[in-house]
Amino acid sequence: MAEPTPQTTPTPLRIGVFYEKTQMTDLAGLDILGNISTEIVTMVTTLLPAYAPLLPFSHPTTFLYIASTLSPTWCTPSMNIVPTHTYATAPTDLDILLLGGPDPMNVPEESLEYLRKAAKETKTILTTCTGGMWLARSGVLDGKKATTNRMLVESARGAFPKVEWVEQRWVVEKGEFEGAEIWTAGGAGCGIDMTAEYAFRNFDRGLVLSALVGLDFDVKGRGQFYTEPIPEIPGLK
């Protein structure tokens, strides 16, 4: 695809994040999107003026943290995050919605109702680890390919047989309207690489490279497919 060109008036982005007893590292890829926001790129240029040419490619970004209530919500490891919205108050027409991995068999029904609405209006849904199973519980993945933590793929097949579960680091499927996409990833490391790949496909390459370099995330080693079997764990049969 053609490289994006700078906008005279950068398009504002709204990125929603589910925070409901999730694995903190499943959401680590969010920092890639944060590092290409106008707020962070502006801060970087004050420290590294040579990066100023990247500023026109950045986007003003609002992050919405969504949970059952506005009270501090738990995520690993024993952290409490203050949400900005509930499932009842959060807009469903976001640019990006990110789901990390909770216990997928114990998620609130209101989150599933939100996902059914958001799938019809939100351009891109990204999931990591059991976040794919969370999305599957809503029915949004029925008839589509998807993945989850590779140690749980067989469990996912049993729990959600209407989804075509595959053992890949990430999977990209069409969403419910023209131009919409659903990206599902395996464990947290896969989620970082998936988000990097999504960013490369949708934003200026130099801007994304600067984000990855700044985070010391892998630039060249990303791959959609596993190259090694699951390692044997001593003590397990």
Image (cartoon, rainbow, N blue to C red):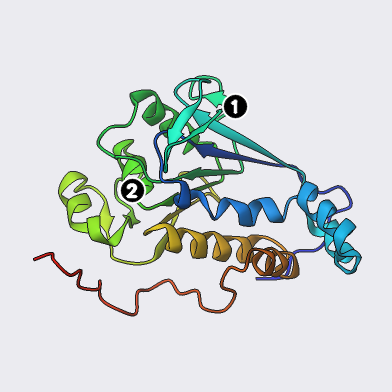
At a point 60% along the width and 38% down the height, the residue shown is 94
Q: Is 92 left or right of 204, judged from the image as shown?
A: left
Relative depth, front residue between 188 and 180: 188
Residue 168, image quadrant? bottom left
Amino acid found under the numbered disc labelled 2: Thr
Q: Is 188 left or right of 43, judged from the image as shown?
A: left
At a point 40% along the width and 29% down the height, the residue shown is 111
Amino acid found under the numbered disc labelled 1: Thr
At a point 34% along the width and 46% down the height, the residue shown is 141
Above or below: residue 50 compared with residue 186: below
Relative depth, front residue between 228 and 12: 228
Q: Are there few (<14), some (14-19), or many (20+) residues within 10 Å of tag 1?
A: some
Above or below: residue 133 compared with residue 187: above
Q: Identify residue for label 2.
A: 130
- The label on residue 84 is 1
Above or below: residue 157 compared with residue 99: below
Disc 2 on helix, strand or loop?
Answer: loop
- The label on residue 1 is none
Marker count (numbered): 2
